[in-house]
Amino acid sequence: MDRATADYMGMMATIMNALALQDAFRQAGVEARVQSALNLEQVVEPYIRPKAMRYLEEGRVVIFAAGTGNPFFTTDTAAALRGSEIGAEVVLKATKVDGIYNADPHKYPDAIRYEKITFNEAISKNLEVMDATAFALCRDQKLPIRVFSINKPGALFRVINGENEGTLVHM
């Protein structure tokens, strides 16, 4: 399969995930809206920045789906882009591991986790937890990234409450 087709399929999968997340928020009594970079107006709203900003000002959760709407750009880059556009305080990157390591901790048990690392260090060391475009965009916008494990019980709660969880990528 060619890369562009695979990327579009991945973008559509993020729309399905966003709808599931929206429903979970609804069940928890939290109003959430899904905005998509791909046009699928019968199911989700199109991404419109001023509308997203208004939802956020009203206290709603906005779930961005379908990446940037363009193949060859990762969801990490889309998160950095949307975070920059809405003036987010931090990008949260939930992964299979509990932060950024100097080597793959699944292959190298002696890998060392960074508590903090600068954008330039992450880029120069080619740390593959996020792509270089996402790191560079966040660096240029002075938008920190918090990398943590989605599988660790309570990690997301701790991150949202500002606790020191995972790895902080900063200036």
Image (spheres, rainbow, N blue to C red):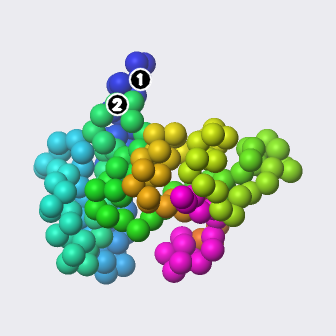
In the picture of the structure, the residue carrying the numbered disc 2 is 71
- SS category of the residue bearing label 2: loop
Task: Tell me the kind of residue under disc 1.
Answer: Arg
Question: Considering only vertical position in the picture, is 115 above or below 27?
Answer: above
Mark 2 touches mark 1? (CB < 8 Å): yes
The reply to whether residue 43 is visible in this rendering is: no
In the rendered image, residue 2, in percent from the top left (x then y), is placed at 40, 18
User: Residue at position x 31%, y 77% from top?
Assistant: 30
- SS category of the residue bearing label 1: helix
Q: Assess whether residue 22 is covered by the magenta stretch.
A: no
User: Residue at position x 36%, y 78% from top?
Assistant: 28
Toward the viewer: 126 or 15?
A: 126
Q: Residues within 10 Å of mark 1 (few under 14, many from 20)?
A: few
The boundaries of the magenta stretch are 156-171
Q: Residues within 10 Å of mark 2 (few under 14, many from 20)?
A: some
Judge left or right: residue 140 versus residue 156. left
Q: Residue furthest right?
A: 110
Q: Residue furthest top?
A: 2
Placement of the C terminus among the 4 image quadrants = bottom right
Task: Tell me the kind of residue under disc 2.
Answer: Pro
Q: How many marks?
A: 2
Q: Assess whether residue 165 is covered by the magenta stretch.
A: yes
Name the quadrant containing residue 32.
Answer: bottom left
In the rendered image, residue 166, in percent from the top left (x then y), is placed at 64, 64
3D distance between C-alphas at marks 2 and 1: 8 Å
In the rendered image, residue 126, in percent from the top left (x then y), is placed at 63, 38
Judge left or right: residue 113 versus residue 13. right
In the picture of the structure, the residue carrying the numbered disc 1 is 3
In the rendered image, residue 71, in percent from the top left (x then y), is placed at 34, 31
Among the two numbered marks 2 and 1 on one chain, the one whose residue lies closer to the N terminus = 1
